[in-house]
Image (cartoon, rainbow, N blue to C red):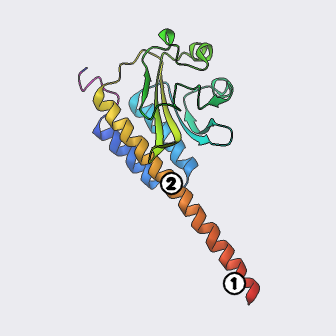
C-alpha cells in the first residue's frame, strides 16, 4: 500500500491530536475527534466509547456518520464486542461479511459497514474505552496507519484521565468552599 492510499498520516494525526488537547470536556473531545476522523480519513463513521464497568458495556461518548438506528442496535457488551475484553491490541475486521467477530453482524450489513477497526483506549493496561472506525469498503489497514491510530488512543486516554482528575479537583474545591462558607 502506498502512502497515498493511507487514510491517516502525520498531518492528519497532528491535527486530531491538537484537537484532543484543545478540548475542554470529554463530550467536545469525542465530537471533534470523531468528526475529524470521518472527514479527514474519508471513512463512513467513527465512534468513541467509554467503558461502564458496572454494566460491562461500552457506552457512546460521541459518534459521527452512523445512523441512530445503528447506534441504538443494543448494548455493546465488553466481552462480546469484537473481542475487546481479552485483547489490548487493535482488532481489524477487514471485511465484515467474512467475519465472526461482530456482535451485531446483520446490523453492520444493513448499515453498509464493510470494515471496522476497533482500538482499545487503555490506561496502564486497563481498558477505559474504545475508538472504532467504520468504512463502507473492505479496508486493509497499513502498519503506519495502525501506529498513528494507536497513538491517538493513548492521547484520548490521557485526555479522559485529565478530565476525570480535573472534575475531582473541582468537586473537592467546591466542597471546601461550602465548608469554608459554613464556618464564616
| In the image, residue 7 lies in the stretch drawn in magenta | yes
Mark 2 secondary-structure assignment: helix
Q: Residue at x 44, y 15 (%)?
A: 137
Picture coordinates of residue 169 (x, y %)? Answer: 57, 67
Contact, mark 1 vs mark 2 (Cβ under 8 Å) = no
Q: Which residues are magenta?
A: 2-8
Residue 25: give x, y in percent of width and height.
55, 54
Q: Which mark is residue 161?
A: 2
Location of mark 1 (residue): 180
User: Which residue ends up furthest to the bottom in the rendered image?
Assistant: 184
Answer few, some or many: residues within 10 Å of disc 1's Cα (few below 14, many 20 plus, some between 14 and 19). Answer: few
Residue under the point 60% across and 20% down: 103
**Label 1 SS:** helix
Q: Is residue 126 magenta?
A: no
| Badge 2 density bin: few <14, some 14–19, many ≥20, Cα 10 Å | some
Instruction: Give how far across and how far down residue 134 sits, in percent.
Output: 49, 25
Amino acid at each position: 500500500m502506498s502512502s497515498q492510499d493511507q487514510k491517516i498520516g502525520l498531518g492528519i494525526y497532528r491535527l486530531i491530536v491538537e484537537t484532543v488537547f484543545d478540548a475542554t470536556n470529554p463530550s467536545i473531545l469525542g465530537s471533534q475527534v470523531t468528526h475529524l476522523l470521518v472527514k479527514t480519513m474519508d471513512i463512513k463513521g467513527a465512534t468513541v466509547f467509554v467503558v461502564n464497568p458496572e454494566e460491562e458495556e461500552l457506552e457512546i461518548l460521541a459518534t459521527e456518520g452512523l445512523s441512530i438506528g445503528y447506534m441504538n442496535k443494543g448494548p455493546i457488551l465488553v466481552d462480546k464486542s469484537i473481542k475487546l475484553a481479552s485483547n489490548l491490541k487493535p482488532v481489524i475486521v477487514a471485511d465484515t461479511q467474512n467475519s465472526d467477530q461482530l456482535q451485531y453482524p446483520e446490523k453492520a450489513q444493513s448499515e453498509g459497514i464493510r470494515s471496522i477497526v476497533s482500538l482499545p483506549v487503555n490506561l496502564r493496561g486497563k481498558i477505559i474505552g474504545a475508538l472504532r472506525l467504520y468504512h463502507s469498503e473492505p479496508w486493509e489497514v497499513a502498519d503506519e496507519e495502525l501506529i498513528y491510530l494507536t497513538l491517538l488512543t493513548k492521547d484520548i486516554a490521557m485526555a479522559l484521565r485529565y478530565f476525570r482528575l480535573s472534575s475531582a479537583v473541582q468537586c473537592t474545591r467546591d466542597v471546601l468552599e461550602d465548608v469554608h462558607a459554613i464556618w464564616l
